[in-house]
Image (cartoon, rainbow, N blue to C red):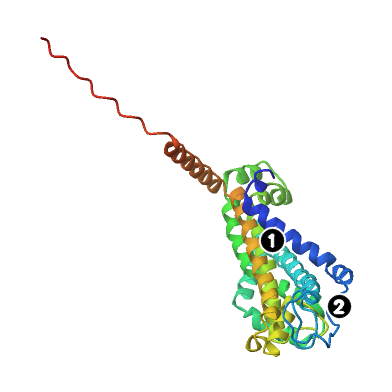
Amino acid sequence: MKDFLHSWKVRTGLAILCLYGLFAIFGPGLDALLRLDPHAIDYTAIQQPPSTAHWLGTTTGGEDVLAQLLVGTRGSITVGLIAGTISTAIAVLVGVIGTFAGGHADGFANFLTNLFLVVPVFPLILVVAGYLQGGGVLMIGLLIGFFGWPGGARTLRAQTLSLRRRDFIMAMRMLGERRWRLVWVEAMPHLAGWISAMFLHAVVGAVLAEAGLAFLGITSPDAVSWGTMIQQANQQSALLRGMWWWFVPPGACIALLGLAAGLVNFGIDEIANPRLKAARRSLVRQVDRRAGAAARPAPTPAAPRTQEVPS
């Protein structure tokens, strides 16, 4: 854990993710504390840029953008966590446990993965979400998570096949070790880096997918998220009106979430792959040696000795 938090990239990424978590938990309460309402209309400040009264400006209907952004954080993060948890759990079940089970279970898991890989996922989600329109962020998160696991399962299957043939796994099998213990005690620690990175990727991908569905109008009319903010800004031609304060904040929040997940993933890669850690350490030592050599003063040339000529 100490090595994981040693990198400034990991600390920065975790700080951003924790900030998003706080906004998701306390966002509506913060709106109430600041006396903001995402659905309230201020008829005296319609289509106004950021000011002291409205820190992020207002929409064409006089709604406060900051209030919508704080409430929308909960909606988007909820979709990301639900979809990321479901898709990662299914990928582990199919890609790791199914591969270790072998036999017909492995064959069925491989067939199921290949079947979902060739299915056009986003159009299918679009059709199902349109049919179930009105379910809110929970339904969107469940749909994205249910259809978003095949790529991760394929990656975990390849890693598990390589891991299953290693010497220590074969030795544990010959000693009669139980299969469930091989999976959870012996294999899972070696796959923790892949699973963690997969979960972060699934969370960011789910937030982007929800924004895409909301942009196309496939969302509950009562839901507030970053995607619905961008969709409403597009409907009201905010770009043509020059209302950058309406669509830039939610877009920047999505981009910052992806950046934070990438920074944390760097730290996970260094722990899961010892070669990266060794390479980083050797690079640091090399830079330190060069810096020390550059800081040392250059030796002064010795004065030439004159030879005395005998008289």
Q: Which residue is drawn at 70% across and 86% down?
A: 127
Q: Residue furthest left?
A: 311
Q: Label 2: how many residues lie within 10 Å, few (<14), some (14-19) or many (20+)? A: some
Q: Which of marks 2 and 1 is nearer the N terminus?
A: 2
Residue located at (78% from left, 62% from top) = 21
The label on residue 37 is 2
Dot 1: element: helix
Q: Could you tell whether 172 is left or right of 278 in the image?
A: right
Q: In the image, is 39 to the left or to the right of 15? A: right
Q: Is 244 placed above or below 289 here?
A: below
The answer to whether residue 192 is visible is: no
Label 1, on which residue?
92
Question: Within the image, what quadrant is residue 174 found in?
Answer: top right
In percent of width and height, residue 141 lies at 76, 73
66 or 101: nearer the viewer: 66
For residue 261, what is the image quadrant?
bottom right
Residue 262 lies, with reference to residue 277, above or below; the image says below
Q: Where is residue 240 in the image (x, y as percent from the top left)?
A: 63, 89
**Residue 306 locus on image (x, y percent):** 20, 19
